[in-house]
Image: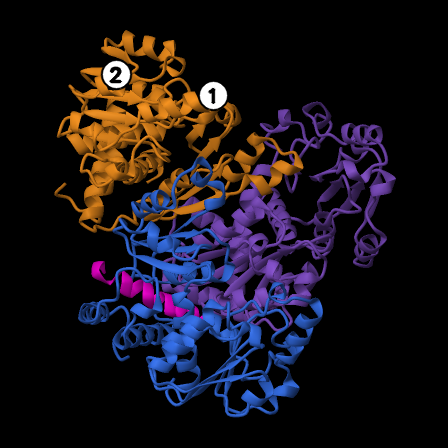
Chain colours: A purple, B orange, C blue
Amino acid sequence: DSITTTDPRFLADLTQQILADPLPKHIISVSAFKKPHLHQILNLAHQYRLCKIKKQPLNHILEGKVMAMMFYEASTRTTSSFSVAMQLLGGIVQKCDPDTSSLVKGETLSDTVNVMASYADVMVIRHQEKGAIQKAIVNTHTPVISAGDGTGEHPTQALLDVFTIREEIGTVNSLTITMVGDLKNGRTVHSLAKLLTLYRVRELRYVSVPSLSMPPEIKNFVKSRGIKQEEYTSLESALPDTDVLYMTRVQKERFSSEEEYIKTRSAFEVTPKLMTKAKKKMIVMHPLPRVCEISPDFDTDPRAAYFRQTEYGMFVRMALLTLVLGHSL
Amino acid sequence: DSITTTDPRFLADLTQQILADPLPKHIISVSAFKKPHLHQILNLAHQYRLCKIKKQPLNHILEGKVMAMMFYEASTRTTSSFSVAMQLLGGIVQKCDPDTSSLVKGETLSDTVNVMASYADVMVIRHQEKGAIQKAIVNTHTPVISAGDGTGEHPTQALLDVFTIREEIGTVNSLTITMVGDLKNGRTVHSLAKLLTLYRVRELRYVSVPSLSMPPEIKNFVKSRGIKQEEYTSLESALPDTDVLYMTRVQKERFSSEEEYIKTRSAFEVTPKLMTKAKKKMIVMHPLPRVCEISPDFDTDPRAAYFRQTEYGMFVRMALLTLVLGHSL
Amino acid sequence: DSITTTDPRFLADLTQQILADPLPKHIISVSAFKKPHLHQILNLAHQYRLCKIKKQPLNHILEGKVMAMMFYEASTRTTSSFSVAMQLLGGIVQKCDPDTSSLVKGETLSDTVNVMASYADVMVIRHQEKGAIQKAIVNTHTPVISAGDGTGEHPTQALLDVFTIREEIGTVNSLTITMVGDLKNGRTVHSLAKLLTLYRVRELRYVSVPSLSMPPEIKNFVKSRGIKQEEYTSLESALPDTDVLYMTRVQKERFSSEEEYIKTRSAFEVTPKLMTKAKKKMIVMHPLPRVCEISPDFDTDPRAAYFRQTEYGMFVRMALLTLVLGHSL
């Protein structure tokens, strides 16, 4: 950290790191990441975070580079996070609005992507259909970062979750991490569980109603990496040893009756009272938006990390954009 | 004005001014402004205007700073004005589109604000509901500028109105300022009337149909500051001594019949013929958009200041953004 | 090309060129271009293309300049192309969204334009109504570039089409250029045919069903410039000598029956098989989006120039923006 960002050695050093362990060309799934990739991304994100605090200029890093964003499903926070990340590094952001565009005229996703790819150095795409992005970019030379594909993956969310844990607690190893809510349909927890197997976590705990429990393929994957897992139906019993409490939204549509939904919702709600039973030094995370999973009364508790989590996301995206564009820095 | 913007003394001097009379953290109401604040804002706006004319670079002033915009009610001109202002100062603009975002998922305004606040150094928010912004930002550390809250206030509009008068006529003191149109519902004229009480204006004149006259609370406020006011039902009789004619839009919905609306509209229309009865050296203003309040035939008259008014707005917003972000320049 | 972009002589030289042959103030129709204008635009576009390849910085060229975009008809690719072009040159882009803006309040197009003109150094406007832009900008001092007005013209599309031919083949002279599809309603081919009359092309060929053939006024204009033209109803017979095959979209709505549409569509489809009958050294162009005019199987053929064409468009817009803003560089 002794070299400032404007020192030519900063970029030279960065380029060398990138050449040593190049990331996959397209960032579509966390399964493609190896431990050195994670190190590279999270270390650079940490460095960028320090630069922001110290007000060191960063807008020369991606000067003249263009990021195109294609969001077929709206997401203010993901769009904003990527967009601000790119601009803080001096890059150009070009948003496409697919609703009002050529889709109406019958253009394929692949064609739209290739048109935007002709202007862009990197593309960020979200699509509502699992696998659609991967299929569309078969002939695309510009690197693509997925910002989520339906029930598929949302790789940068998983990265920012791990980064949040590392920045808040100092390490990911030896932690008990408890995931709560709709573990069946939540792509966030699937990607996170997979990514955590690259670390030596102590235990993963899953808290949900039986109908929304973690799918067997995720549990088998975690098991194959030798990581302890346990399932709970009560938040209160899973809470005491928990270092990281990862809350997710439970959607009303998943329940057979309004009554059952309300019962589940309040059984799994984080409140100041409930949190007296948790460790003093632990964190509560949430990918946001929240509805009733965490009481606003808890927001001022120092353990409430969910708004800091969104800021960490920006640094992770800054790091990822730099590394993906690294070959041309 | 002898120091150029790129001289380090320019920013140092600016910082000193800011420390001497810091603005309120959030800019929600004109009532919070004292005379030194107004001086500071309008002087800096004037300086920026000169810089633009002389093509002096300004894009280092807010380099690396992020402005988030959340408009829950569309407004092309206010959005554009803030956005261009921020970018001319070298800052980054991040627009959020609340229609297609997390609101649908049940997120509170306060949560949405706090998520965006984690990326931003300053936020500009418009909301359709009076008081909603103030309520949402109770726990927000990032400074917020209101761009209007329903029938409440639109503080930057009032500032740009005063700035327009100052730049066009050279002073605000000793002027007769006549406001015309829907004075009952127009938040623009309410904020302007309040702000003008900080100056020694000669007289405020209100021209409207009786059902749309200036509300008692505004008239009482103006009276309490010792400023002369008079009400008119005829534009022609209020016109002769007027230095500033401030026109506002009258909406059809405010009238009981189409007939009454059309009658009022034409009685209060600024035309080249009517304006032969006005002073040679005076100005006509309008917050825009106009419908039928000012005939397009008058546009080429040098007294027509309404399109220049929108440009003045940009300089006022540049000044305000600088001063609000001043603590971190 | 030996002077780098950061050399002060680069801008000085550019300014001199601009003064020698100033473009029309507003860019509304290709008819206003003379040969020296075309040379100037396409040479600068070529120079910018080389700069991009060599990674020479260009973001000082339009630093501090503001481009306002008003698209009353959505067009992702045209918007993106202009927007990225402006930003690569260091300029500021301000998009207006007319759907949700003052139009609802009854503002005229002319007023909206003049409001935005007060912030902008150049405006890019698309409108669905032929002639609407020209009418709205009568009193506008800021230069305006049309991005298409309904069935009227789309001048920058025609420029990028000519630029594509020049960059891909090296010259426009002595070529056989074949236009295919809906030649009656396609504004693209109308503007292109007009613009090509400034060059010594060998022949223009028009392939369409009789009901969608090139309108007499275009054919008369081309004829008056002494350029050979021929009409075909079969793509296969027009293909063999063709140097540039310009495909356009045929809309279902233009046909009396679904059956007739499908028949036409497949008769005019570019496929790898059909293209064995074409020259080895020729190019296929398309303004995009395509539907079924070109089989995706042809995309990997080196003669498929349509995705490169969109990138050329960016360089043409960079050149045009520079030249239009040239008086104030």
Which kind of residue does numbered mark 1 sit on? Ser
Would you identify the image quadrant in which residue B226 lies?
Answer: top left
Whole-percent x, y for residue B238 in the image: 22, 18
Q: Residue sitting at 40 percent across and 57 percent down? A: A5
Q: Does A77 sit left or right of B79 as displayed?
A: right
Pointer 2 indicates a residue of which chain? B
Chain identity of mark 1: B
SS at mark 1 in the image: loop
Q: Residue B326, how many percent across, how many down?
A: 32, 36
Image height of B218 relative to B285, above or below: above
The residue wearing badge 2 is: B205
- Which picture quadrant has residue A132? bottom right
* Labelled disc at residue B158: none
Q: Is residue C322 magenta?
A: yes
User: Looking at the picture, does residue B22 appear above or below residue C116?
Assistant: above
**Which residues fall within the magenta stretch?**
C311-329
Residue that mark 1 sits on = B257
The quarter of the picture where the N terminus of chain B appears is top left
